[in-house]
Amino acid sequence: MAKKFGNSLRLAALAGALASMMTAAQAAEEISFNMSWLPQGSVGGVLVAKAKGFYDEADLNVSVYQGYGGQRTVNEIDQGLFDIGYGDPVSVILNRVNGGKAVFVGSINTVWPGALCYIQKDGEKTPVLADFSGKSVGGGATSPVQNIVPAWLEQNGLPKDHLKLLRMNPAVITSSFLEGQVDLAECWEGASLPILNENAQETGKKIGMIKYRDFGLDMYGSGFVTTEAMLAEKPEVVDKFLDASYRGYEYMAAHPEESADLIVKQYPTLKKSVVLNQIKQINALVRDPHAENKDLGFVRADRMEKTMGFVREAFVVDDSIKTVDLYRNISR
């Protein structure tokens, strides 16, 4: 009897050990994702993928974190503080100029989504860029605007100081602009623009905007950024993350109302009407009709070359930074 009992204990222990081994083998891979700012439509595909369980199905446990601007986010990813994040190619290039190894691995904004917003007054003609000489612009302290606007002005035949760039806390840009403390505000489709429009309507104001891309800025906006080390050590994890994330963007395009509800459920302080407008804007930006590969996220060599050309001229970047090193179209 004692012998049988001992055998039973050993079998139970063996079964427990095997179960523990199987559980460990099946444990989800931990991924930290930096949103570059607050939860909003631009990163909605990630938030929808999380809510719908797409990451769970890929054996990924994705933790989402607030960010503090594009350049800081890219640098923090390069420093290993986050695995993947939402960042722009200009910040990736500047990171590599300073010895970093950040890599752009998937597009979300297939065109540059930024603009300069102004208060549109009834009866006034639609202004052009040259009309804003000496006007102040409220921009985030670590926003790509700080790097891009001076070069963009020169590209349009205007002096770098045509606009007075201010470095501001992003949280106060909208209120400062609507209260008249700054003349222009940086605004982003799929992000701050719907917030600005809604706040302006509440005060009886109407927003106009000058899109950078309408004045010669032909390059990618933000997408997914990681590091060379992450790609070398865990390429299959990055693959799975991108697959699940773009599945989230596809779902968001097909189900905008439900997606807005899913995002607001995760972040109850958000306003659904704003999130829904952000989603509608990002849905129009995420798909590139000119890409030879129609999968979401495909990075075109010609667009990256144009981006590199703009930055090389604007910031006097030497030939040691190669366009081919800036991005990857990894297996999906």
Image (spheres, grey):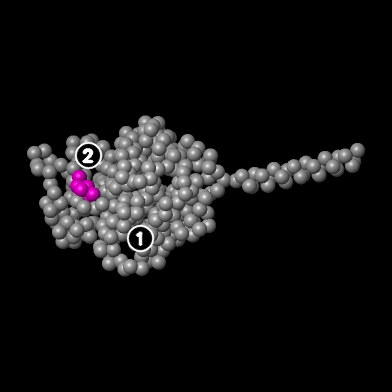
User: Could you tell me if the residues under marks 2 and 1 are in contact, i.e. CB atoms within 8 Å?
Assistant: no
- Report x, y in % for residue 100: 41, 63
Per the image, label 2 sits on a secondary structure element best described as helix
Q: Residues in magenta? A: 209-214
Residue type at mark 1: give it. Answer: Thr
Q: Earlier in the sequence, mark 2 or mark 1?
A: 2
Q: Nearer the viewer, residue 50 or 265?
A: 50
Mark identifier at residue 298: none
Q: Nearer the viewer, residue 183 or 126?
A: 126
Q: Residue at x 47, y 36 (%)?
A: 52
Cα separation between marks 2 and 1 = 41 Å
Residue type at mark 2: give it. Answer: Ala
Q: Is residue 146 visible?
A: no
Tell me: 9 left or right of 188: right
Q: Nearer the viewer, residue 146 or 296?
A: 296
Per the image, label 1 sits on a secondary structure element best described as helix
Q: Is residue 57 visible?
A: yes
Tell me: 149 left or right of 93: left
Q: Residue at x 38, y 59 (%)?
A: 324
Q: Residue at x 82, y 40 (%)?
A: 8
Specify the farthest residue to the right. 1
**Exactly how many numbered labels are in the figure?**
2
Instruction: Name which quarter of the figure residue 73 lies in.
Output: bottom left
When the figure is inspected, residue 262 is found, relative to residue 157, above or below; the finding is above
- Look at mark 2 in the image and give the residue it sits on: 200
- Look at mark 1 in the image and give the residue it sits on: 323
